[in-house]
Amino acid sequence: MSEKPIGLWKEALPGDAGGSDWTSITMGALEIHVQPSDPLSAADQYQDWDGSLNRAMTALQQFADLESLHVCFTGPTGCGKTERARRIARELKLPSYTLQGHPMLTPEDVVLSPVLTSMTGAPRYVASPLLSAFLNPGGAVAIFDEIGKAAKSAEDALAPLSSALDMRRTIYSSMIQTTFQIAPGALFISTAQTDEILPEYITSRMVVIPIEHPPAEILVEIVRAKTPGVSDPLADAFREWIAEHPATSARKGILILHMAMRLLGHEAPARPSAACLISLIRKAAAYV
C-alpha cells in the first residue's frame, strides 16, 4: 500500500458520486465502503438561547480560509451539544457523519476497519463515519460525539486526528498503511462533557465553546415543542416542577413529559386538578 497521501476527489469516484449518496471509493484493487450520512431531521424549535451556535457559526465563517479551525462543544449531558453540531451541518447544507465515542474505541475505529465477507472470507474495508466525511468530495461535517470518552481509550484512539486537524489535513490508516488527504470543505466538530480532559494536541486545534442547561422558561419551551399533545395544565405543572429542579436537561424533561402523559391516561381522573398533575410529574420524574 502507498504511504503517499491519496486525494480522493470527485474524479476518482465512480460516476458523479459525492454529496450524501456516495457509497464506495476504489483505489486500484482496493475498494473502501463509506458510511451513510446521518438521517436528515426536520427543523425543530430549538433556540440558540446562549448564543453558542452563533459563536460557532461566526468562527467558522470568519476563518473559513483556515482549514485547521474546528469546534468542540462542551457541557453537561442533555444540554444540546450534538444537536448544535448537526444544526451547523443543516445551516451549511452539508451532510453530517457521526462517530460515537466510547472507552473501547481504537485508532482504526476512528479511521477504517476490515469486515469479512460471508462468501469469500476476504476482508472488505469500511471507512469510519469520520473518514467518510473527510473524503466526501462535496464537503461534509464530521461529528465526533462524546470525544472525551474516546480520550480514555488505552490505545490512544485519538492519535489519527493529530494530523487531520492541523494544516496537514491528512489521516493515516495503519490497517492498509495509507495516508488519506482530507477533502476541501470538510469540517470537524466534537462534543465532550464539561469535566472531561482532552489531549492538548486536540484542544489546541479547536475552538472550545461551553454550553450549560437553558433557563427554566426556555427549557419548558424546548421540551414542550418536542412533546406534541401536551396540554396547557400539564405544561404548567411541568413548569412548576422545573422551578424546583433547574439542572434538568432537555432530554430528561422530554422523557418526564412523555411518562406523565402516559400516567395521565391511566391513573388520573377525567378532570385532574393542578395538584394531581404536579403529583404525576413528580411520579414520572422518579421513573426516568
Image (tube, rainbow, N blue to C red):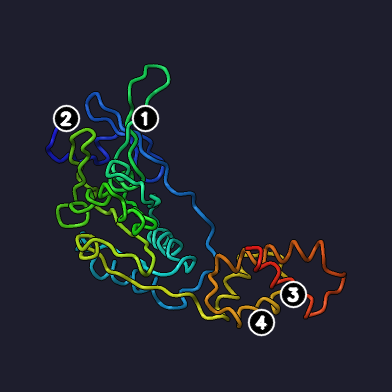
Q: Please give the residue where the numbered disc 1 appears in the rendered image.
A: 115
Mark seen at residue 240: 4
On the image, numbered disc 2 is attached to which residue? 1
Above or below, comparing residue 157 to residue 207 in the picture: above
Residue sitting nearer the eye, 73 or 55:
73
Q: Answer few, some or many: residues within 10 Å of disc 1's Cα (few below 14, many 20 plus, some between 14 and 19).
A: few
The residue labelled by disc 3 is: 279
Residue at image coords 22%, 50%: 159
Chain-order first, disc 3 or disc 2: 2
User: Residue at image x 76%, y 64%?
Assistant: 263
Which numbered disc flags the more N-terminal residue, 1 or 4? 1
Give the distance between the C-alpha atoms of the residues marked 3 and 1, in whole angstroms: 52 Å
Q: Earlier in the sequence, mark 3 or mark 1?
A: 1
SS class, disc 4:
helix
Q: How would you rate the neighbour count of disc 2 (Cα within 10 Å): few for under 14, some for 14-19, many for 20 or more?
A: few
Left or right side of 150 for 80: right
Quick check: 167 left or right of 196? Answer: left
